[in-house]
């Protein structure tokens, strides 16, 4: 897969008091991800070209994709495609990359979301709200053992923009 076709749309960097191996484990472990990702469980096939799945708390596949880069414990890049009818056709694929760097006694984690097409600002607003909450909760889990619970409203602007594109949004 040529990742050159993806253009970054969201980039977040945080510092975590943990080791690169522990951050890697949290990003690739179902048990860890359920703590910081609102009950969603990550499944990563440990190789380039392997499967990537994010399961909803009910066990259904919420996000599916493929592992593009598996470089433990430095870099994980996966296609990250929400399992809503018509979404990938309307928006193209999404690539999420995690880069983990040791910086003294902590880790600098950079998460980049990139898209193969230009994405409307209303659609990006969902990730701009969600990713900081997810990454903050990840940091909290790794540093305190407890997730950070962030009360968030549904991303109405994003959901309405997707409906205008003809994407079938569950529950709407």
Image: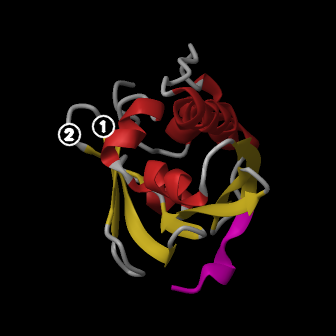
Q: In which quarter of the image is residue 125?
A: top right
Q: Please name the residue that numbered disc 1 is placed on.
A: 56
Point out the residue furthest to the bottom here.
2
On-image quarter of the C terminus:
top left
Q: State whether residue 85 appears in this view.
A: no
Query: Residue 112: x, y in percent?
Result: 68, 58
What are the residue bounds of the magenta stretch? 1-8
Which secondary structure, mark 1? Answer: loop
Residue 5: which quarter of the image? bottom right
Residue sitting farthest toward the left: 59
Please tell me how crowded label 2 is: few (under 14), some (14-19), or many (20+) other residues with Cα within 10 Å. few
- For the residues labelled 2 and 1, the Cα–Cα distance comes to 5 Å
Residue 59, label in figure = 2
Res 148 label: none
Residues at discs 2 and 1 in contact (Cβ within 8 Å): yes
Q: Position of residue 71 (x, y in %)?
A: 53, 76
Give the x, y percent position of residue 89.
Answer: 46, 62
């Amino acid at each position: 897969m040529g990742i050159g076709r993806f253009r970054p749309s969201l980039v977040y960097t945080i510092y975590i008091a943990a080791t690169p191996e522990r951050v890697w484990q949290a990003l690739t472990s179902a048990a860890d991800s359920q703590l910081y990702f609102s009950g969603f469980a990550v499944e990563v096939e440990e190789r380039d070209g392997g499967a990537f799945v994010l399961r909803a708390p009910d066990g259904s596949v919420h996000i599916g994709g493929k592992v593009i880069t598996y470089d433990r414990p430095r870099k994980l890049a996966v296609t990250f495609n929400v399992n809503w009818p018509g979404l990938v056709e309307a928006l193209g694929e999404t690539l999420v990359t995690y880069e983990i760097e040791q910086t003294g006694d902590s880790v600098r984690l950079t998460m980049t979301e990139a898209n193969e097409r230009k994405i409307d600002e209303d659609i990006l607003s969902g990730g701009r709200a969600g990713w900081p909450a997810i990454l903050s909760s990840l940091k909290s889990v790794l540093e305190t053992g407890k997730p950070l619970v962030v009360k968030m409203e549904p991303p109405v602007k994003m959901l309405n923009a997707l409906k205008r594109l003809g994407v079938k949004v569950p529950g709407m």
